[in-house]
Image (cartoon, helix red, strand yellow):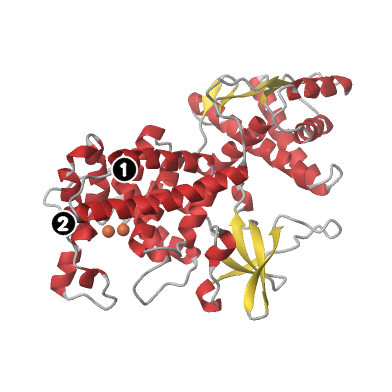
Amino acid sequence: MPDEKPTLGHEHLPAKLGTEFITAFYRLLKGTTLYDRGSVVIDRLTRECLQVVNGIIQWEGNLILRVVRGHFFFNQTRIIASPDKYLIFKALWQEMKKRRIGGMEFSEAVSGEHLKDLAFLLSGLEENNESNYLSVKEQLKNRNIESIEVGKLEFSKDEDLSVDSEGQKKYSKEVYFRSMGLVKEVVENIDQQKPLPIRKAKRLIQNAVNAVAQDDSTLLGLANIKNYGEYAFNHSVNVAIYAIALGQRIGIPKKHLSHLGMASLFHDLGKTKIPEQILNQTGKLSPEEASIMRSHPVVGAELIMRMKEWGELSARMMEGAFEHHLRYDLTGYPRLTQKKKMTLFGRIVTIADCYDAWVRPRVPPRFPYVSEKILGFMLERSGKDFDPAVVKVFINMIGVFPVGTLALLNTNEMGIITQIHEDPELADRPKLCLIYYRDGEYRKGKGVDLREMDEVSGAFKRTIVKTLDPNEYGINVAEFFI
Ligand SMILES: [Fe+2]
Ligand SMILES: [Fe+2]
C-alpha cells in the first residue's frame, strides 16, 4: 500500500485507506489473543499493520479511527464496509465495544514495537470497564509512546452495549424456531380463512433482522443444517435468513430488511394452493402437473395482494412471490409479456431460494451435501439465473466451508464446522467440533480452531482435506450444532 499512489477518486480514498487499516489492525489484535508477543506470527502481523499505518500517515499526515454507534469514521469520513470486509468491520467494532474503546489516533509514524504495545494493551483490557481508555493512556505514557492516543467509547443511553455471545446464540435459535411456527400459523390461517397474525409476523421479522445483525453465524448455521421440522416451513425460514443476511451485506437499510424478510418468508405461499400430490411427487411431473406447479408464483402474488391487512408491505412481499422463479435473464416463469427488470428483492430471494433448495433437494438425484459444488454451480449461472453482483456477495457470505459442514482433517479426525472467522483470509481455517465414533455412535469431541499452529514447526496443527456428506455416515449434524 505505501509505495503505490492511491489512484481512486478522491471520495473513495478514505474508504480504501480506512478499510486497509481496519483489516490490518483487526488481524493484529486478533493475533494477540492467540500468539505470544515473541511469536513469528505476531511479527508478521505487526509488520503488515505497520506498513499500512505508516503509509497512511505519510499520505494523510495522521490516522484517526473513531467508532460512533457502530459506524466507523476514518479521518472524519464515515466509511462503509464492502461486502467482503463486512465481518471484519463488525468484529473490530465488537472488540472495541467490549473494551469501551471508541477510537485511536496516530499523529506520526510509529515503530513496530509501539504498535505491538498498543495491540497487546488493548487485548489485555478487561471487558465493560468504562475507564479502560485511561489505563491505556497511562500505559502509553509510561512507555513514552506519544504518537498514539486512544479515546473513550461514547454511546447513547438507548444503545445496548452488552456482548453476550451465548445469549445471542440462544436468541437466534429461538427466533429461528418461532419463525417456523409463524409460517405454519399463516399457512393454516389461510387454509381456514382466519385473520392473519400480522402484528406477530412483523414483530418476529424485526427480531430476526436484529438477530442477523448481531450474530448471523448462528442463523446461517441453522439454515445450513436444515434438518428439522417440515420441509416447507423450514425452507421458508432458511430463505428468509439467507435473504436478510445477504441484504444486510449489500447495505439495505434495516427497515427495508424486515420487508425483505417478509417477502422471502412468504415467497412460496402460492404452494399452499398446489395439490399435495403434485407437491410431494418425487418423480417427473406430467406437463399438466408441471404447469400447475409453475403457477405458484402467480398464485402466491394473488394471495398476498388479497391480504389487505399487510398494507404497504404487500407490494414488497409480492416481489418475492412473483419473481422468485423468474431468473435474472427472465427465461424462467411466469413468462412475462412485457420485458421488465427484476426487482432487487426478487433477485435476492431467487438466490436464497435456489441455494436452500439445492443444498437439501427433496428429489433425487441429489447433489451431495457439499456447498462448494453448489456455489460453483451458482457462479456458472451468474448473469443467467442470478444477478452477478448479488450472487458474488452471497458466495462470499456462505464461504467454501459453511457452518454445519462435516469435514475430514489431515489428522484423520472428523469435525463439524461451528464457526467461520471474520477474516476472509482465514476462510479455510474455521473452528470445528471434533466428533469421534465409540460404542456404535458418533460423539461430540473437543472444539478446535484450525488457525492453531504448532509453535515449534510453525505449521498448522490441522487442515481440512475435504468435506463429507453427513448422510453417508449417518451423522445428524443438527445434534452437534444445536
Ligand atoms: Fe418457489
Ligand atoms: Fe422456494
Total count of labels: 2
Q: Residue 49's x, y, as percent?
A: 71, 36
Q: Quadrant of residue 454?
A: bottom right
Q: Is residue 232 above or below residue 55?
A: below
Q: Residue at x 82, y 23 (%)?
A: 140
Q: Is residue 27 above or below residue 53?
A: below
Q: Earlier in the sequence, mark 1 or mark 2?
A: 2
- Regarding mark 2 in the picture, which secondary structure is present there? loop
- Would you name the residue on which mark 2 appears? 335
Q: Nearer the viewer, residue 259 or 191?
A: 191
For ligand 1, the image quadrant comes to bottom left
- Regarding mark 1 in the picture, which secondary structure is present there? helix
Q: Quadrant of the N terminus?
A: top right
Whether residue 70 is visible = yes
Three-letter code, disc 2: Arg
Q: Residue 351's x, y, as percent?
A: 36, 54
- Label 1 near ligand 2 (CB < 8 Å): no
**Left or right: where does residue 183 sit relative to residue 168?**
left
Label 1, label 2: how far apart the Cα atoms are: 19 Å
Q: Residue 180's x, y, as percent?
A: 38, 54
Three-letter code, disc 1: Leu
Q: Is residue 68 above or below residue 194?
A: above
Whether residue 381 is visible = no
> Which residue is the extreme one toward the left?
337
- Label 2 near ligand 1 (CB < 8 Å): no
Q: Quadrant of the C terminus?
A: bottom right
**Left or right: where does residue 53 sit relative to residue 172?**
right
| Residue 344: mark in rendering | 1
